[in-house]
Amino acid sequence: MSFINYSSREINCKIVYYGPGLCGKTTNLQYIYSKTNPEAKGKMISLETGTERTLLFDFLPISLGEIRGFKTRFHLFTVPGQVFYDASRKLILKGVDGVVFVADSQVERLDANIESLESLENNLREHGEDLEKIPFVIQYNKRDLPTAVDLSYLEEVFNPRGVQSFEAVAPTGQGVFDTLKAVAKQVLVELKRGDRHRAP
Amino acid sequence: MNTQTALFEEDSKRLTELCLKLQQESYAKAVFLLDKDGQLLSSVGEVEEIDTTSLASLTAGNIAATGGLAKLLGEREFPVQVHEGEVESIHISLVGERLILVILFDNRSSLGLIRLKLKHSYPELLQVSHEIFNKPPEEVRSVFSQISDDDIDDFFSFD
Ligand SMILES: Nc1nc2c(ncn2[C@@H]2O[C@H](COP(=O)(O)OP(=O)(O)OP(=O)(O)O)[C@@H](O)[C@H]2O)c(=O)[nH]1
Ligand SMILES: [Mg+2]
């Protein structure tokens, strides 16, 4: 649910990072936070458990610049990846404009990725959304680990539609901004196209 | 999908006037109006030292979570929440289906006074919120339609 404020001349869009537990969603936001100019970012909020697992969400507002005199902000959210937090994940997806699916490249996390992607589809459907119709990119994270599966195999399993995808090592930032820019761009293009634009 | 909220100058002004009236009459420290997605529509009072974006997103998350709880228990929603601190307190209430009103207050006011003044302001807030969210589509002239592909490409050429 994008938001246009004609009074303060702001456009706000919501992007959600989704994926299995420990795949690196929070790390993506932390990296973005650490590399963004102070004036372009708000505070990063992390609602986490005592052991640094996301409990409800991470939230990071960033502004990338102006379009036609409108300050354009992206509200980045992560969901909690642990399986039993599905109800929370569904809440966070409400009103989403674009989704990044962060997959964990390690062979032992293949099934966790599959399960998470299925839950993404289901939770979106419950909000009346369709993963095939919203801005969507895939990030294969943890490419640095020795048990990382071949990219071609991951693409075959997770990306039959051939959406934009990126290899990443979130703690070093590899692929992090490419992923963000790709999804943000898709969101703007979709908003511009506006063919599904309805009154609020 | 991609429902879009647009807040126009004149509506923004009306909302801010209503919030200001409520804030002054109830002796509240600050009043915020946001939508359930955490977008801030209006903020008045002593707001300089408050990170309003964080406040809005945390409040929306809180309302979403309590809304989920309510459903679980067979309630439609919990329309009011109050958190009383030692110095500052916070009153959170729903305005219709889409908006959340947050009132911050301290010992210059009281819960009873907040409730009373809110009761007086509520009908008009509800009315304006209804008008904002039920604008006929042709009135919601989107800025996006004026954005060109070049604008978007320029936007992403920043590094
Ligand atoms: N080696 C390596 N470690 C990573 C990578 N990305 C994240 N990690 C580590 O994996 C752990 C979990 O990362 P988080 O970002 O907290 O994972 P998350 O997806 O937010 O997990 P939940 O909040 O439980 O859903 C941390 O210790 C990160 O440092 C990566 O690309 N390579
Ligand atoms: Mg996390």
Image: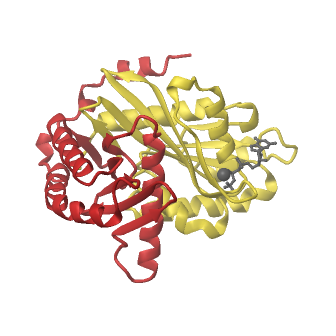
Chain colours: A yellow, B red
Q: Is residue B117 left or right of residue B31?
A: left
Q: Is residue A169 visible?
A: no
The quadrant the C terminus of chain B occupies is top right
Give residue B88's position: percent from left, percent from top: 46, 54
Q: Is residue B152 left or right of residue B8?
A: right
What residue is shown at x 71% (from left), y 37% (from top)? Answer: A170
What residue is shown at x 46% (from left), y 79% (from top)? Answer: B72
Q: Is residue B103 visible?
A: yes
Q: Quadrant of residue B47?
A: top left
Give residue A125's position: percent from left, percent from top: 43, 63
Q: Is residue A162 left or right of residue B79?
A: right
Give residue B45's position: percent from left, percent from top: 32, 41
Q: Is residue A199 left or right of residue A10?
A: left
Image height of B158 relative to A165, above or below: above
Of residues B85 and B12, the one nearer the viewer is: B85
Give residue B86's position: percent from left, percent from top: 52, 59
Image height of A84 relative to B59, above or below: below
Of residues B111 and A200, the one nearer the viewer is: B111
Residue sitting at the far front:
B108
Q: How many numbered badges does the structure rendering display?
A: 0
Image height of B110 relative to B138, above or below: below
What residue is shown at x 51% (from left), y 24% (from top)? Answer: A39
Residue sitting at the far bottom:
B74
What residue is shown at x 35% (from left), y 68% (from top)? Answer: B80
Of residues B94 and A188, the one nearer the viewer is: B94
